[in-house]
Amino acid sequence: MADTKKPLLIKRYASRRLYNTETSDYVTLEDIAEFIRAGREVQIIDLKSGDDLTRQYLLQIVAEHESRGESVLPINVLTDLVRSYTTQATSVVPEFLAASFEMLRDGQSKMLENMTKANPLAAMPGMEAMRAQQEAFMRAMTGGFSGLGGKSSKADSDTKDASGDLDAIKKQLAELQDKLSKLDR
């Protein structure tokens, strides 16, 4: 069995076909998206040049989902992202987005953990099926983001800390929007 802690290596040939080195077969962008949804890290390398193309292909996957009407990113967020590329100063956007998604994953993990742990109803017949439906619903509502059981740097903090973190994120977002609006002038 393959080591799932290591990124799955995908090689891109000159013909632009993508080759899964673990299973020795060709894969599509949708296959790669499925690996990621299942919690697997991937790395896509150009066979000839050795360049890492992972970011380029991940952006392509997001663009395809958005073009099919599976909109996760609001227009104002996309606009702010485009603006962040035009700033000369070091952008805080990448760090902000990474922290925001980590908090989302941690929140999902805590919520699912609380639904199953210390719940006297968990032993009732049919509760496991209901929990599975709730997990599927949460995945659907968050666009299939992985990490439901992922690492959690602050997963042990209580709910009060989470609301404080949300307030801090709102403040950071407001500061970021203010900086972006000043750069437009």
Image: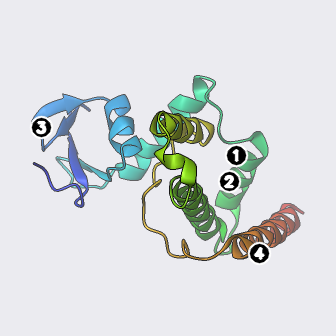
Measure the C-alpha gap from mark 3 to mark 4: 45 Å
Q: Label 3 sits on what residue type?
A: Thr
Q: Label 4 sits on what residue type?
A: Gly
Seen from the viewer's position, the closer of residues 163 and 7 is 163
Seen from the viewer's position, the closer of residues 120 and 92 is 120
Label 2's element? Answer: helix
> Residue, x 56% and y 47% (percent of image)?
121
Question: x, y percentage for residue 95?
Answer: 59, 70
Question: x, y percentage for residue 83?
Answer: 73, 55
Measure the C-alpha gap from mark 2 to mark 1: 5 Å
The residue to which callout 3 is attached is 23
> Residue, x 82% and y 72% (percent of image)?
171
N-term-proximal mark, 2 vs 3: 3
The residue to which callout 4 is attached is 164
User: Looking at the picture, does residue 121 appear above or below residue 89?
Assistant: above
> Residue, x 54% and y 30% (percent of image)?
65
Question: x, y percentage for residue 20?
Answer: 18, 39
Badge 4: residue crowd in 10 Å (few <14, some 14–19, many ≥20): few
Q: Label 1 sits on what residue type?
A: Leu
The residue to which callout 2 is attached is 81
Q: Label 2 sits on what residue type?
A: Leu
Residue 110 seen by the camera: yes
N-term-proximal mark, 1 vs 4: 1
Measure the C-alpha gap from mark 2 to mark 4: 25 Å
